[in-house]
Image (cartoon, rainbow, N blue to C red):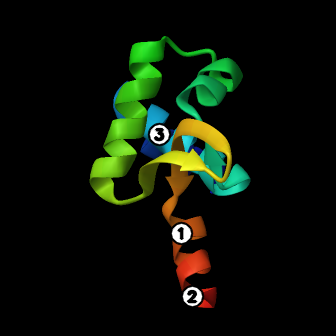
Amino acid sequence: LWPDLAAKAETFTRREARSRLLECYLRSVGAATPAQAHKLLRWPKSDVHSAGQDLIAAGAAQEVGALGSQPGPWWVSADLLHAANATA
């Protein structure tokens, strides 16, 4: 299992890997601002932005202007959005 994992990881570009890591982060927390993602991941802001835009384009996340009274932008996991729509 583990030797195959290393071989698979070599096929990802840095950009793809960052998008996957950001997607895992958003799935675990539900939603985050780009600034929160930058603070945690410590990537250059341009890389955080690119990863977020890749997730939005792929439908894995959505950008919203605010969450309740908290100003954004926020990136919201598609999983969270689907769960919220299913209970609505």
> Up-down: is 65 above or below 40?
below
Residue drawn at the location 46% of the way across and 49% of the way down:
64
42 vs 13, left or right, is right
Q: Nearer the viewer, mark 3 or mark 2?
A: 2
Residue at image mark 3: 9
Mark found first going from the N terminus, 2 or 1: 1
What is the C-alpha distance between the residues marked 1 and 3? 29 Å
Residue drawn at the location 57% of the way across and 88% of the way down:
86
Determine the image quadrant of residue 71. Answer: top right
| Image quarter (top left, top right, bottom left or bottom right) of the N terminus | bottom right
Residue drawn at the location 47% of the way across and 25% of the way down:
48
Q: Nearer the viewer, mark 1 or mark 3?
A: 1
Residue at image mark 2: 86
What is the C-alpha distance between the residues marked 2 and 1? 9 Å
- What's under tag 3, amino acid-wise? Ala
Given the current orientation, which residue lies at the most extreme front position? 69
Determine the image quadrant of residue 53. Answer: top left
Quick one: SS at disc 3?
Answer: helix
Given the current orientation, which residue lies at the most extreme top position? 44
> Up-down: is 29 above or below 11?
below
